[in-house]
Image (tube, rainbow, N blue to C red):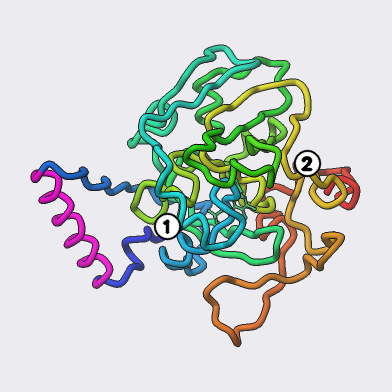
Amino acid sequence: MKLNWSDVTPRVDYLDRRAFMVAGMAAGMAGLAPPAMALTGRPSALSTDEKPNTIAEITNYNNFYEFGTGKEDPARNAGSLTTDPWSVEIGGMVERPGSYSVADLAPENALEERIYRLRCVEAWSMVIPWIGVPLAAVLNKIGVQPGAKFVAFETLMRPEEMPGQQRAILDWPYREGLRIDEAMHPLTILATGLYSDPLPNQNGAPIRLVVPWKYGFKSIKSVVRITLTDQQPSCTWQDMQPQEYGFYANVNPQVDHPRWSQATERRVGSGLFAGRQDTLPFNGYADQVASLYQGMDLAKNY
Ligand code: MTE
């Protein structure tokens, strides 16, 4: 039985949070913005028992190029994003295509806590306590047609609220994709929260993909479109630099990025003198996922 975040959080944090929520409720009654509702997710055996990064670390050191390329740009700029109302268009080779709300896809009674390692292709890492639902549950609800082989994802396109999209830093909108067996794997989730809060905007509110055995760029944020297809989808980073970023992007210490080693990583928040730690094959999830790639040359299919 894994511990829930609340079991390991110092009580002072809790008290602060309670005080914050009470203040929020008072503000709500005074006609101000309603407080964000606390979320809880059922603990999962798929969570790591490594110590999660702090909420401050997870929300102030981000990659979200729609809000700028600096690590602190998303925290600074993402507040402007309107995340409610939100809908996700699900289409292509599915039985029930349509426009789904976040609550349709990730109803509160289905939420799970998943404490996962996140390993960025830039060789930093964190441990993040996500709240979300297995992507498989969503796909099963929508009904996948037998011929579907891949799932394509797209981030919202809204340059007026996403200043990074006013420049051609990437080929917007941000696009990612998974093979259907990767998408259906129990580790793959759509996250709507972290710690016990709804997802902060800089982390991909209101709903983002998390695929913990792949480099972080596969875990696309603020998703508005999910398409089931029989063709391998076009992915933003792969299209931009195909020699550097592959479709699979499985964490692999043996296959270096052309411009740097992937053998080790820096755990954000571990301190200046902590040193680097070894990067693990499939980011430490090899027991669960290596079989998906049996017989494949992982140096070619990077
Ligand atoms: N999704 C979108 N739409 N835009 C981005 O720039 N960056 C990716 C990924 N998802 C990115 C994105 C990268 S490189 C990483 S490492 C993770 O988001 C970072 O997630 P985090 O900021 O929540 O830690």
Stretch in magenta: 12-30
Does 13 appear in magenta?
yes
Which residue, given by chain and number where applicable, does mark 2 sit on?
Answer: 247
Q: Point out residue 292 in the picture as x, y percentages from the top left corner.
A: 75, 41
Residue appearing at x 78%, y 65% in the figure: 262
Residue 1 - label: 1
Give the side of residue 41 with respect to residue 278, left or right.
Answer: left
Residue appearing at x 28%, y 68% in the figure: 13
Q: CA distance from mark 2 to mark 1?
A: 35 Å
User: Which numbered disc flags the more N-terminal residue, 2 or 1?
Assistant: 1
Residue appearing at x 55%, y 21% in the figure: 90
* Residue neighbourhood size for the residue with mark 1, other residues' Cα within 10 Å, grouped as few (<14), some (14–19), many (≥20): few
When the figure is inspected, residue 104 is found, relative to residue 5, above or below; the finding is above
Viewer-side label of 2, 1: 2
Give the side of residue 163 with respect to residue 21, left or right.
Answer: right
Residue kind at label 2, given as amino acid type: Phe
